[in-house]
Image (spheres, rainbow, N blue to C red):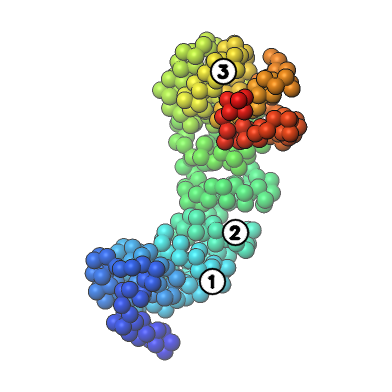
């Protein structure tokens, strides 16, 4: 307690002696609001503690102090929290970010609040830097009870994910699993999918890769599952969960608008629906992306529209980053009579790996066509090579 009183005395003396400019050596002057904040005794004590003990920049400390205050009688509790966090591998930056997100952590009881959660997490694999990364990302975990929230959710996820690596990967991808009432959406939705016939391992894939899809209201999940089934996709089919994920991500009106848009580009409704059933991610693309891709392949590459309809995967590739640079390279090589561009050109534009394309069509002819690499990178226009 003597040490705590000495610290309080030191902080109070610094509040009087330290000018605003010296507290913020990286800033030229403090704003009027900063000065008024420091004029308050309680606010000054909070700011000084956040800066000197927690490592927050003055600007952040002032911002936190507007919504959160530490009083002298609570100092020992806050010091204990800091000591506890450091003992669990939190560095100064992580402590600062945690306090900025949830300053009330400084008032938590170490034994009855923090230790229980930390013990559970470390016992279940959250060790080393994984633990502070998780807590900083979602501080709300510290405001949830272990027995009624964190532990049941953890055990439920573990029943689908067959090893700790997958479990940790799922929680790192979507730490908010621990902050929601899993009985509200996650559990009923996964139980419903299993009941409908979706294989256990594909539900696990949704949990691991597309967790937000399982957080929707259960009644909407029922509607979307029925919509996908009405298109002729069976829950046991591998593509079912992908179609489900895409349809979950758009409203009914957006779905209808996209089908109409594809019809305006030359698809029939049956072709658009068949495209979705074969490759659901096509309809996840924006209308702008679909339109620009159709325009490029039909009007620049001169593929027939039905060729694109028959190979809708073409619409997924980036025109500016992948397709156009490759097309420009091939056209230059063709103009120099170095290659013959045939009807299978679109496979070279899309499916050939980056390494293979560069090796076979850029590096191979770089000596014969100066500037070819620049064409490929998009830093030189094609017409400048031809001149």
Residue assigned mark 1: 86
Question: Can you give x and y, in whole percent of width and height, for residue 139 in the image?
Answer: 46, 58
> Is residue 241 visible in this depiction of the protein?
no
Q: Which mark is residue 300?
A: 3
The image position of residue 223, as x and y in percent, is 47, 26
Label 2, label 3: how far apart the Cα atoms are: 49 Å
**Which residue is depicted at the point 51% across and 11% down?**
266
In the rendered image, the residue lying farthest to the front is 387
Query: Regarding mark 2 in the picture, which secondary structure is present there?
Result: helix
Which comes sooner in the sequence, label 1 or label 2?
Answer: 1
The residue lying toward the viewer, choosing from 233 and 3, is 3
| 340 left or right of 279 in image | right
Point out the image quarter for the N terminus: bottom left
Please tell me the numbered disc located at residue 130: 2
Q: Which residue is at a point 67% across and 20% down the rendered structure image?
A: 335
- Tag in front: 2 or 3: 3
Camera-nearest residue between 385 and 258 = 385
Tell me: residue 211, above or below residue 46.
Answer: above
Instruction: Give residue 69's position: percent from left, percent from top.
Output: 32, 69
- Residue 159 drawn above or below residue 325: below
Which image quarter holds the C terminus? top right
The residue mark sitting in front, 1 or 3, is 3
Q: Residue at x 70, y 21 (%)?
A: 336
What label does residue 172 carry, if any? none
Q: Are marks 1 and 2 in contact (CB under 8 Å)?
A: no
Q: CA distance from mark 1 to mark 3?
A: 60 Å
Q: Quadrant of residue 99?
A: bottom left
Distance from the alpha carbon under mark 1 to that under mark 2: 14 Å
Secondary structure under the numbered disc 3 in the rendered image: helix
Which is more N-terminal, label 3 or label 2?
Answer: 2
Relative to 279, is 334 on the left or the right? right
């Amino acid at each position: 307690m003597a040490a705590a009183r000495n610290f309080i005395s030191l902080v109070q003396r610094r509040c009087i002696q330290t000018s605003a400019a010296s507290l913020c050596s990286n800033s030229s002057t403090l704003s009027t609001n900063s000065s008024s904040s420091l004029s308050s005794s309680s606010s000054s004590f909070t700011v000084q503690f956040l800066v000197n003990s927690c490592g927050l920049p003055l600007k952040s400390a002032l911002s936190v102090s507007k919504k959160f205050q530490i009083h002298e009688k609570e100092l020992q509790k806050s010091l204990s929290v800091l000591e506890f966090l450091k003992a669990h591998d939190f560095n100064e930056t992580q402590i600062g970010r945690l306090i900025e997100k949830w300053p009330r952590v400084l008032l938590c009881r170490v034994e009855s609040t923090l230790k229980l959660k930390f013990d559970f997490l470390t016992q279940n694999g959250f060790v080393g830097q994984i633990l502070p990364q998780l807590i900083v990302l979602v501080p709300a975990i510290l405001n949830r009870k272990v027995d009624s929230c964190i532990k049941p959710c953890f055990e439920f996820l573990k029943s689908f994910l067959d090893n700790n690596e997958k479990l940790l990967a799922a929680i790192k991808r979507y730490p908010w699993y621990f902050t929601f009432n899993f009985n509200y959406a996650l559990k009923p939705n996964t139980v419903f999918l299993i009941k409908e016939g979706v294989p256990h391992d594909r539900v696990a894939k949704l949990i691991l890769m597309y967790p937000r899809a399982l957080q929707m209201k259960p009644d909407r999940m029922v509607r979307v599952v029925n919509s996908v089934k009405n298109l002729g996709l069976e829950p046991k089919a591998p593509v079912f969960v992908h179609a489900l994920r895409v349809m979950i991500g758009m409203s009914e009106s957006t779905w209808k608008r996209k089908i109409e848009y594809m019809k305006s580009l030359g698809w029939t409704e049956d072709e658009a629906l068949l495209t979705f059933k074969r490759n659901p991610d096509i309809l996840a693309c924006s209308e702008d992306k679909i339109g620009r891709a159709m325009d490029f392949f039909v009007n620049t590459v001169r593929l027939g529209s039905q060729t694109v309809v028959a190979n809708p995967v073409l619409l997924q590739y980036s025109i500016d980053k992948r397709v156009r640079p490759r097309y420009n390279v091939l056209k230059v090589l063709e103009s120099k009579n170095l290659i013959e561009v045939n009807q299978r050109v679109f496979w070279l534009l899309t499916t050939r790996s980056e390494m293979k394309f560069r090796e076979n069509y850029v590096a191979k002819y770089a000596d014969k066509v100066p500037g070819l690499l620049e064409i490929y990178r998009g830093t030189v226009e094609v017409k400048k090579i031809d001149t």
